[in-house]
Amino acid sequence: MSEDSLLVVVLAAGMGTRMKSARPKVMHEIGSKPMLGHVIDLGRSLDAEGCAVVVGPDMAAVASIANAHFEGAQIFEQTERLGTAHAVLAARPSFEGRSGYVFVLYGDTPLLTKAALDGLYQQLKDGADVGVLGFEADDPTGYGRLLLDENGDLAAIREQKDASEAELAVKLCNSGVMGFRAISMTELLLEVGNDNANGEYYLTDVVELARARGLKTVASLCNEADVLGVNDRVQLSEAEAIFQARAREKAQRNGATLIAPETVFFSADTEIDEDVIVEPHVVFGPKVKVGRDVHIKSFCHFEGAELAPGADVGPYARLRPGAKIGEKAKVGNFVEIKNADVQQGAKVNHLTYVGDALIGPSANIGAGTITCNYDGFFKHKTVIGANAFIGSNSSLIAPVTIGEGAFVGSGSVVSENVNADDLVITRAERKVYENWAARFRKSQMRRKAALSGD
Ligand code: UD1
Ligand code: CA
């Protein structure tokens, strides 16, 4: 551990009853990523060496999210909810005897950014012992108020329920984010009592306790949106909206054209390269990578998909996990692709299902082609060679291989391999009955007339 190492302690013990959910609150997602993941990833962006997460009883799923986002995250259980200071003390082994800095973050505050924390971090590095991140609230009701002294240092944090009239008028609020010089943290926390309106151990009390010891206590400011706390599903969607607005701006600043940005939805891990064009109404689910010069037409839905440079997709294309669209390949309307490699220059233009398949370079998949990949028990693979041509409305019953340059006649059901450059047709033989339709029509009309008595 280095001298100025950073530990991030994340409070995530609350069940979040107002979410009305069987899942702990911090597991709910913003941009397809659990809120807790956003907070822990922020710690990583600050090069935190350690991460401690305080969870409630029976929150194994929360612990596993923590570990997925921070290898070796320490999990501590707070069995009784006795207040924020009590919650931080649940993680005492993670910071006791430590040097460097500690940030306490809330697991339900997913929009916090590195930029918002940088100022506070710098003040700690410049000698402050305790600092909080504050913001000017339009409506401060419910928040702890930041009381500054004549030097602009932080004198105290007063909780709403314990505040005087004059203190309630203060608009500078506590976001809940606190930073500590690790060396004084344990002693300060152990001094916190619960003699207040809620009978809780308030983390915020450490400010006055620190000043009584002659330590330096400061406040650093951020925007209210950075520290929006999510308590119910309405706030969850508000946080999602802010996340999406930021993601859209980032994609555009990185060189993607979004024709109607407000209709495009990103995941936290979406990667979009330069000169990509995204038409209106596109959803990027988790794990999507889009290469340069890709054109995404309207009404597409992607997850777990990779699009190589110059690919052209949509409108109305659905790319599911494992879809890889090669350079300059084309995927058209009402096409679903799952776990399949559509290689360079291949075309899958209309009304097709491609699952568990490899489509070789420049192959052409006709309208209505279906890879029949599932037999009700197992999935099987379809391999289509380079330059092969699959006629419209064909069913390819996997496992099956269509050789390079082979032709499949329209409407075929192909259950055995086809060699390179062969033509296969499995249609029934053509039969023609001359003038049959005319005769049929005439006799039916006669019968109908007789029955209705005309
Ligand atoms: C807290 C702050 C308040 C600040 C506000 C910002 C205190 C005393 N007050 O108030 O100054 O303006 O956040 O949103 O800190 N938690 C636990 N265990 C507990 C108690 C809380 O893990 O025993 C967690 C909660 O799950 C939540 C966070 O700590 O993530 C904050 O707790 P909460 O009860 O919401 O604090 P507030 O009253 O909102
Ligand atoms: Ca709260």
Image (tube, rainbow, N blue to C red):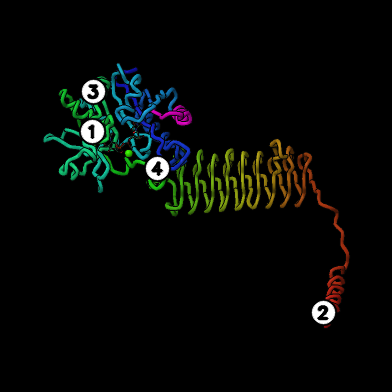
**Quadrant location of the C terminus?**
bottom right
Measure how far apart labels 2 and 4 are at the Cα level: 69 Å
Q: Earlier in the sequence, mark 2 or mark 1?
A: 1
Q: Which residue is more in the foreground, 380 or 162?
A: 162
Magenta span of residues: 53-69
Q: Which residue is mark 2?
A: 452
Q: Is residue 142 left or right of residue 319?
A: left
Query: Mark 3 — residue?
Result: 191
Whether residue 68 can be seen here = no
Could you classify mark 1 by the number of other residues whose Cα lies within 10 Å: few (under 14), some (14-19), or many (20 or more)? few
Q: For the view shown, which residue lies furthest in the left direction?
A: 150
Split into 4 quadrants, where in the image is the N terminus? top left
Q: Is residue 269 left or right of residue 329?
A: left
Question: What residue lies at 48% left-to-right and 31% top-to-bottom?
Answer: 61
- Cβ–Cβ below 8 Å for labels 2 and 1? no
Q: Mark 3 or mark 2, which is nearer to you?
A: 3
Q: Which residue is mark 1?
A: 196
Residue type at numbered disc 2? Ser
Q: Which residue is mark 4?
A: 18
